[in-house]
Amino acid sequence: MREFVLHVHRAVINFIQGFVLTEIVLIIGFVNTANRSSKMKMLKTAAFGLALVAGPAFADGHATGDAVAGENVFSKCKACHSIVDADGEAIVKGGRNGPNLYGLYTRQAGGEEDFGRKYGKSLVEAGENGLTWDEASFVSYVADPREFLREILDDKKARSKMSFKLGDEKDAKDVWAYLVSVGPETKTN
């Protein structure tokens, strides 16, 4: 069901983008040179307003990557991580060296209860200091886990038990989008 929703979501965004671009071309083509400046200001204001209103409504608020591509990239992650829902059903069977990534975007860093004491001290400390996973922190963390923790904790001795690095930002955003797509529903305001 979530896959269907993601595809509909992308189709709506593509439709809106196409509609806005078509309207811009039509307005620019029919605006005479005397009124072009005021019409362009009005067009820019309308486009900015549409972006503000439609962005959160259609972008899911959690992820900017491609969930379908992220599913393929996640094959690199499943050597250590699995995705198992709250009912114990495996979405992706994987290793147990890393925590279950189901619902990652809803929790504090180092806070997956079943993984418990296996977390590194630095990651737990970052979570206790308020780090909760979102797209930006996830992308930075997977690019270089040790460096991320050193920066966020301002501690040159901070370490991570995760040695794997996913340096490609697009891949990291895609994996994040995939994790969000298979995770629990979240309430939006």
Image (cartoon, rainbow, N blue to C red):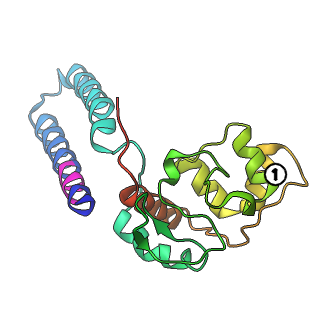
Quarter of the rendering containing residue 113: bottom right
Please tell me whether residue 72 is drawn above or below residue 39 in the rendered image.
below
**Percent x, y of residue 161:** 76, 66
Q: Main secondary structure of the magenta part?
A: helix
**Percent x, y of residue 97:** 66, 73
Which residue occupies 33% across, 45% down?
59
Does 170 lie within the magenta span?
no
Quarter of the rendering occupied by the N terminus: bottom left
Does 8 lie within the magenta span?
yes
Comparing 138 with 115, the one in front is 115
**Percent x, y of residue 100:** 55, 64
Q: Which residues are magenta?
A: 7-12
Which residue occupies 18% across, 49% down?
12
Comparing 84 with 51, the one in front is 84
Tag 1 residue: 150
Please tell me whether residue 119 is drawn above or below residue 39 in the rendered image.
below
| In the image: residue 51, left or right of residue 1 | right
Comparing 125 with 153, the one in front is 125
Q: Secondary structure at mark 1?
A: helix
| In the image: residue 134, left or right of residue 161 | left
Tell me the kind of residue under disc 1.
Arg
